[in-house]
Image (tube, rainbow, N blue to C red):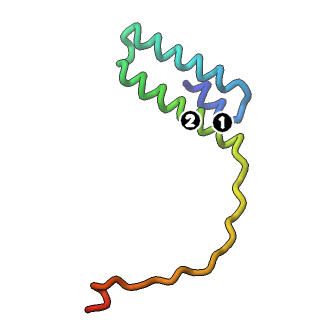
Amino acid sequence: MTKFRRGIADGAEGVEDLATVAISALDRAVSKGVLHRNNAARRKARLMKRLSSEQTAAVAPTPAPAPKSAPKKTTRSKTASKR
């Protein structure tokens, strides 16, 4: 887990392999009774979420700014105009 976190922070190559190793270690800890299965599932979910967000951040280009549009007119509701 620590090597994976450091790999993500450094932007190192082969982070997918580190994720696989971390998941395997968590599964082994569950099978030996060191971790509860829900604890390991939560950790694996967070690990995969971090991995996917890192991959999409590296691939996704920055969006171009949207053109400014004219301000929208606001109208009052019927109940507000009766007051």
Q: Mark 1: which amino acid?
A: Gln
In the image, is residue 41 above or below residue 79? above
Q: Earlier in the sequence, mark 2 or mark 1?
A: 2
Give the residue at mark 1: 55
Q: Which mark is residue 18?
A: none
In the image, is residue 61 above or below residue 3? below
x, y percentage for residue 46? 49, 32
Q: Where is the N terminus found, in terms of image quarters?
A: top right
Q: Are marks 2 and 1 in contact (CB under 8 Å)?
A: no
For this orientation, the residue located farthest to the front is: 78
Q: Mark 2: which amino acid?
A: Arg
Towards the viewer: 80 or 56: 80
x, y percentage for residue 59? 71, 41
x, y percentage for residue 14? 71, 24
Q: Marks 2 and 1, how far apart in space?
A: 9 Å
Towards the viewer: 1 or 70: 70
x, y percentage for residue 15? 66, 26
Q: Residues within 10 Å of mark 2 (few under 14, many from 20)?
A: some
- Residue drawn at 52 percent across, 19 percent down: 23
The answer to which image quadrant residue 56 occupies is top right
Q: Where is the C terminus found, in terms of image quarters?
A: bottom left
The answer to which image quadrant residue 8 occupies is top right
Q: Residues within 10 Å of mark 1 (few under 14, many from 20)?
A: some
- Residue drawn at 57 percent across, 26 percent down: 2
Q: Is residue 17 left or right of residue 81?
A: right
Give the residue at mark 2: 50
Q: Is residue 6 left or right of residue 45?
A: right
